[in-house]
Amino acid sequence: MTYQKKRNTAETQLNITLANDASESNINTGVGFLDHMLTLFSFHSQLSLQIEANGDTEVDDHHVTEDIGIVLGQLLLEMVKDRTSFKRYGHSYIPMDETLSRTVVDISGRPYLSFNAEFSKEKVGTFDTELVEEFFHALVINARLTTHIDLLRGGNTHHEIESIFKSFARALKEALSQNDYDGVPSSKGVIE
């Protein structure tokens, strides 16, 4: 299925489509490093992304990054609500050369982010590394996920962030995958 949402504010204009068909993605956020990370996210989660974003990047990349996280989280929540069965839990360790990241995801309906990453530098190119946490916070809260992200070993800042995006994507892919039995994976019979 395909999910689409637009968000227009005084700071950003977004048009995002999310599909679970692993087709080719087309990502244009106006922020080169974020495009790269979202392309990796799409590939490793096997979720197709079509993103057209314009924003006040002459100020900085904060609003575009956060708002994409918000909309992507809302689309993921819609996708989860349409599924009758999924594993619910996922985890992934991803090395990127000298770095190592771990992500654990629970599609719980209870939004919570534990983000433990101290980046080696404050910027990758012109991208502020503190925006990585902003992006994941926006996504996790709006998708209503419980998520723990840990940078276990650091090194090159680009590698640190790349391993986090890949780790999150792989954990999410596992959590969204088909369950061994029919029905919602909760003893309550519902995830809200």
Image (tube, rainbow, N blue to C red):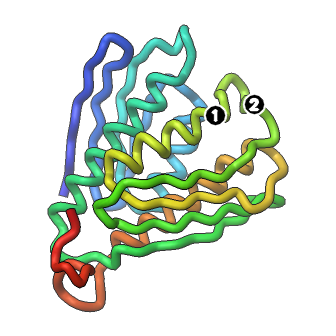
The residue nearer to you, when weighing 188 against 34, is: 188
> Which mark is drawn over residue 157?
none
Task: Tell me the element at label 1.
Answer: helix
Disc 2 to disc 1, how far (Cα)?
7 Å
Q: Which residue sits at x=72%, y=27%?
A: 125
**Residue 94 image-quadrant placement:** bottom right
Q: Mark 2: which amino acid? A: Glu
Image quarter of the C terminus: bottom left
Location of residue 147 in the rendering, given as x and y in whole percent from the top left corner:
48, 60
Q: Is residue 69 at least partly visible in the picture?
A: yes
What crowding class fits label 2: few (fewer than 14 Cα within 10 Å), some (14-19), or many (20 or more)?
A: some
Q: Is residue 23 at least partly visible in the picture?
A: no
Location of residue 52 in the rendering, given as x and y in whole percent from the top left corner:
35, 29
Image quarter of the N terminus: bottom left
The residue singled out by tag 2 in the image is: 122
The residue nearer to you, when weighing 95 against 146, is: 146
Task: Tell me the element at label 2.
Answer: loop
Q: Mark 1: which amino acid? A: Glu
Q: Is residue 187 above or below residue 129?
A: below
Location of residue 118 in the rendering, given as x and y in whole percent from the top left corner:
74, 45
Location of residue 40 in the rendering, given as x and y in whole percent from the top left corner:
54, 51
Earlier in the chain: of badge 2 and badge 1, it is: 2
As drawn, is 145 to the left or to the right of 102? Answer: left
Q: Is residue 125 above or below residue 134?
A: above
Asked whether disc 2 touches disc 1, contact meaning CB atoms under 8 Å apart, the reply is yes
The residue singled out by tag 1 in the image is: 130
Q: Which residue sits at x=62%, y=54%?
A: 164
**Residue 176 image-quadrant placement:** bottom left
Q: Is residue 162 above or below residue 58?
A: below
**Residue 34 image-quadrant placement:** top right
Q: Which residue sits at x=74%, y=62%?
A: 152
